[in-house]
């Protein structure tokens, strides 16, 4: 143990390098498994060293907390369905924020320790980021899991309240910095917790993928704040890596949606509610519909098929049946690929994880930038459970709330087959003109049931 303590900084450095390798591995589906392993080893090293160098740790309490946390985490990992993964991620972010708040409060109430100027700044920043992360993540979890209303909080009073809460938080934080008043620190914490709610409540459902990514960044910075509070270098590094990578991902997501990051952070929505109302009031348009047998016949006689998955695929848990169907088409000589939009699903990478679970070959999965130029040469596009990410209004209708958002250009294919339960609008509340094109055939029903019927038709 003394040897570990002697080389603690070096072991922390190894852990930090492993965390960097983790991010590198997670940047590609082929490296994700190795990346996770690097992260597990790095965290194990960091925990071991911290336990060794900590002054008089309560091992019984620490081990009890670790066993309880591991049990809950293992159970959740094994039982959570893919449809609930986004809200599970949001809930995990909330725990990081709560940990930052509790550690900061414990530190300021430590009567045996005088905090320097730098430490007071660290406590203030770490606590308010943690408070915002905690409440914002709980609200995001509530919206994604339908525990709270998904529609955004609106009104001319929202922005003034956000500004007032932010100024109050900074004001009481500044007073704590000058006077070390515990009362001011508690009030500052309360302001940050309430501000977290008012930052996320005005954000509509269409922006939830960006919100999840943004909260990932917040949780990273909160963890870095904990590291400063505890004077733990590896926690500072790990938190900074998560915070910066989350911020970069949020920027990429906003770019994919043609949105401003600041607009999302401060509650600018995609106008989903108004759009939904407009879509509901619109005159019913003519569309063509067919059966699963019709769809199977068209795809089995095609040379190339591109599948565009969306959240509806996750809801029906149809990924395994879909991959079995894709294999059946491949055996008939059809070239099958999957097209993934950056914001498909309810969190970044949702569709990639879903397809990986079904053991879809990585080489068949292509991102939007890779495959968009090929749609015009594709015989059939199967849109299954997706909506807004293939809406041509984003390219043509300047009045549309999603105008300018890059989409998967499925409408350029020779034939489009759309599997949906009904003609209802997508998550952003917008009608989709793709459904009314002459080249489009709608197949109504549960995605898994439709795919299974298509598989039977191809097998005969």
Image (spheres, rainbow, N blue to C red):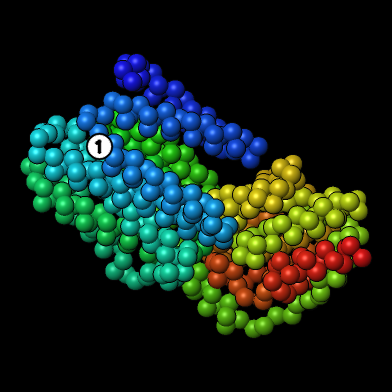
Q: Quadrant of residue 63?
A: top left
Residue closest to the eye, 448 or 266 = 448
Above or below: residue 413 compared with residue 105: below
Q: Quadrant of residue 197?
A: bottom left
Q: Is residue 292 left or right of residue 18?
A: right
* Residue at left offset 19%, top offset 46%: 105
Q: Is residue 147 above or below residue 367?
A: below
Q: Is residue 212 visible?
A: no
The residue positioned 64% from the left and 83% from the top of the image is 283
Q: Return the x and y of residue 386 as percentages of the image width and height.
A: 65, 63
SS type, badge 1: loop
Name the residue nearer the viewer: 252 or 458: 458
Whole-percent x and y of residue 92? 42, 51
* Quadrant assignment for the N terminus: top left
The image position of residue 147, as x and y in percent, is 43, 69
**Does any portion of residue 235 appear in the rendered image?**
yes
Image quadrant holding the C terminus, namely bottom right
Task: Give the labeled residue for mark 1.
Answer: 58
* Residue drawn where x is 31% and y is 17% of the image: 2
Spot occupied by residue 94 in the image (x, y as percentages of width and height): 37, 53
């Amino acid at each position: 143990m003394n040897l570990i303590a002697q080389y603690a900084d070096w072991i922390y450095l190894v852990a930090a390098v492993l965390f960097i390798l983790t991010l590198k591995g997670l940047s590609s589906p082929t490296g994700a498994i190795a990346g996770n392993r690097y992260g597990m080893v790095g965290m194990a090293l960091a925990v071991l060293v911290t336990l060794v160098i900590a002054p008089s740790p309560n091992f019984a309490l620490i081990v009890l907390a670790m066993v309880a946390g591991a049990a809950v985490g293992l159970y959740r990992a094994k039982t959570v369905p893919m449809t609930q993964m986004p809200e599970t991620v949001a809930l995990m972010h909330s725990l990081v924020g709560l940990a930052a708040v509790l550690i900061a409060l414990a530190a300021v109430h430590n009567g045996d320790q005088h905090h320097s100027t730098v430490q007071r700044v660290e406590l203030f920043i770490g606590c308010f980021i943690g408070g915002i992360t905690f409440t914002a993540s709980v609200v995001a979890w509530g919206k994604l899991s339908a525990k709270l209303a998904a529609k955004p909080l609106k009104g001319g009073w929202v922005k003034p309240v956000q500004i007032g809460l932010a100024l109050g938080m900074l004001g009481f934080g500044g007073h704590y910095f000058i006077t070390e008043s515990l009362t001011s620190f508690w009030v500052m914490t309360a302001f940050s917790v309430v501000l977290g709610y008012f930052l996320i409540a005005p954000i509509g459902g269409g922006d939830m993928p960006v919100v999840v990514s943004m909260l990932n960044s917040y949780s990273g910075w909160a963890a870095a704040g904990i590291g400063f509070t505890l004077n733990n270098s590896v926690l500072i590094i790990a938190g900074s890596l998560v915070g910066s990578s989350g911020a970069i991902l949020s920027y990429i997501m906003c770019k994919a949606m043609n949105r401003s990051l600041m607009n999302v952070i401060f509650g600018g929505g995609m106008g989903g509610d108004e759009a939904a109302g407009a879509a509901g009031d619109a005159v019913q348009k003519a569309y063509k519909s067919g059966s699963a047998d019709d769809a199977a016949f068209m795809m089995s006689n095609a040379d190339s098929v591109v599948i565009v998955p969306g959240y509806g695929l996750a809801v029906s848990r149809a990924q395994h049946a879909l991959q079995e169907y894709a294999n059946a088409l491949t055996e008939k000589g059809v070239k099958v690929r999957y097209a993934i939009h950056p914001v498909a699903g309810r969190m970044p990478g949702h569709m990639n994880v879903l397809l990986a679970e079904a053991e879809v070959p990585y080489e068949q999965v292509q991102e939007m930038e890779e495959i968009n130029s090929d749609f015009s040469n594709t015989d059939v596009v199967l849109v299954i459970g997706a909506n807004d990410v293939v809406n041509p209004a984003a390219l043509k209708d300047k009045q549309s709330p999603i105008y300018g958002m890059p989409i998967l250009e499925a409408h350029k294919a020779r034939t489009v087959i759309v599997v949906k339960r009904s003609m209802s609008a997508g998550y952003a509340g917008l009608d989709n003109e793709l459904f009314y094109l002459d080249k489009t055939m709608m197949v109504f029903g549960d995605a898994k049931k439709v795919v299974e019927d298509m598989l039977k038709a191809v097998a005969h």
